[in-house]
């Protein structure tokens, strides 16, 4: 095992960190290079680099088949995919989202001139609390965007009930949830549409990329138009649009990564179980659990630091960073505390007590296919020593 400094050592000597190269959260998983290079070579031979090429079309049909949905509309990234889905659904006015999410969920609305309204989460699941959503509905509310945080499904049925009661739309930000299920059904088919991100740091990547998946033919058709400037033919534009297209080389990466995706999940699961074993029985430290009766991608190893822990979350993050282990506070301090939204809604925190509590407790630990073999033991040793447990 690596030598690990105590907090006393930290103050006294400049011992080298446990890792010379930093360990990152979300270090990209890279699939079979041979497959990628072969597909890229064929792409160069075709001289077809973008504009709905054969690799993008194959990628879309493979994703749709894997998720059991009718349509996959691939995009240049998850944020543009969110914006296009939001527009295609005709959302306006106010849309309810969690504050405990990546900032893009809020920005995609704001950028479209829609007001994101933050509802509180259930501290047990970190997902939207349907009762809190109900409290935030006004006559201007046109929809709800649930987020399947950490890949654990949002309360889909309860949110649908709320949406139906008020005649508003429900869609999902499924950026974390590729390869996950709810009651045995793949995430991707819930609500009017679900949005995936294939960013480099996500479980499954296309360098940058995203998609909207849906069973709705008309919606898929509208989104295909919007992602390509509204073109239906060489000289014919029938709809306002933007440039949301996925390029061929990204689809090649996606096809290569799809081949190894099940292996990636198996590695993530091993890491997750090893982390759980390492922290089992330690006071105030809990690794957020995945329901083993569902499919999970186990991409996020989320440690919650409770009140019974002798040190706080920030001290744990600092001790890990001193060892070049770049654990992250996610999604701290919450979207509502980030400047654009804090300026818009200075008192939003009053409605978000659970969001604020959870955002202050969570640290995401490095995992993924490139995690060094000894890292989980080293990380557990740093934390238990800091806590005075070992
Ligand atoms: C990553 C992420 C996005 C944005 O996806 P990009 O592909 O990076 O644009 C949106 N929502 C959530 C919850 C995310 O984690």
Image (cartoon, rainbow, N blue to C red):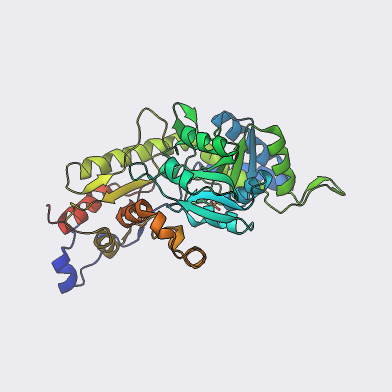
Corner quadrant of residue 126? top left
Q: Residue at coordinates 71% horizontally, 54% vertically from top-left?
A: 242
Corner quadrant of residue 193? top right
Q: Is residue 1 visible?
A: no
Corner quadrant of residue 349? bottom left
Query: Front-most of 70 and 99?
Result: 99
Residue placed furthest toward the front: 139
Question: In the image, 88: left or right of 389?
Answer: right
Query: Front-most of 53 and 173?
Result: 173
In the image, residue 259 lies at what x, y percent? 51, 35
Query: Front-most of 123 and 222?
Result: 123
Question: In the image, 162: left or right of 308?
Answer: right
Q: Residue at coordinates 56% horizontally, 35% vertically from top-left?
A: 164
In the image, residue 249 lies at what x, y percent? 63, 48
Q: Residue at coordinates 35% horizontally, 49% vertically from top-left?
A: 371
In the image, residue 73 lies at what x, y percent? 65, 40
In the image, residue 21 lies at what x, y percent? 34, 61
Residue 1 drawn above or below residue 52: below
Residue 259 drawn above or below residue 317: above
């Amino acid at each position: 095992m690596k030598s690990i400094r105590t907090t006393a050592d930290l103050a006294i000597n400049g011992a080298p960190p446990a890792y010379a190269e930093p360990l990152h959260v979300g270090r990209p998983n890279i699939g079979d290079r041979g497959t990628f290079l072969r597909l890229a070579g064929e792409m160069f031979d075709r001289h077809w680099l973008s504009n709905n090429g054969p690799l993008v079309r194959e990628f879309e049909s493979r994703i749709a088949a894997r998720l059991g949905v009718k349509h996959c509309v691939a995009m240049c990234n998850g944020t543009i995919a969110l914006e296009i889905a939001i527009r295609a659904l005709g959302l306006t006015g106010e849309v309810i989202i969690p504050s405990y999410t990546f900032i893009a969920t809020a920005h995609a609305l704001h950028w479209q001139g829609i007001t994101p309204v933050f509802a509180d989460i259930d501290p047990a699941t970190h997902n939207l609390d349907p009762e809190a959503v109900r409290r935030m509905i006004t006559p201007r509310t046109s929809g709800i965007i649930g987020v399947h945080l950490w890949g654990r499904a949002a309360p889909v049925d309860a949110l649908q009930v709320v949406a139906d009661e008020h005649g508003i739309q429900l869609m999902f930000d499924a950026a974390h949830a590729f390869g996950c299920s709810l009651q045995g059904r793949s995430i991707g088919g819930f609500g009017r549409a679900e949005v995936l991100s294939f960013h480099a740091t996500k479980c499954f990547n296309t360098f940058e990329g995203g998609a909207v998946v849906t069973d709705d033919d008309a919606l898929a058709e509208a989104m295909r138009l919007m992602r390509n400037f509204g073109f239906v033919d060489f000289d014919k534009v029938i709809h306002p649009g933007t440039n949301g297209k996925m390029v061929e080389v990204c689809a090649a990466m996606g096809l290569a990564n799809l081949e190894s995706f099940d292996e990636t999940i198996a590695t993530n699961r091993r890491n997750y179980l090893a982390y759980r074993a390492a922290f089992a029985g330690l006071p105030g430290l809990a690794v957020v659990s995945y329901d083993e009766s569902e499919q999970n991608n186990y991409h996020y190893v989320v440690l919650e630091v409770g009140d019974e822990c002798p040190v706080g979350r920030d001290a744990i993050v600092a001790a890990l960073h001193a060892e070049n282990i770049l654990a992250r506070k996610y999604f701290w301090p919450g979207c509502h505390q980030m400047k654009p939204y804090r300026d818009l809604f200075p008192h939003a925190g009053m409605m978000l007590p659970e969001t604020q509590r959870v955002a202050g407790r969570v640290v995401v630990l490095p995992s993924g296919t490139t995690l060094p073999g000894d890292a989980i033991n080293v990380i557990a040793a740093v934390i238990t020593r800091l806590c005075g447990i070992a």
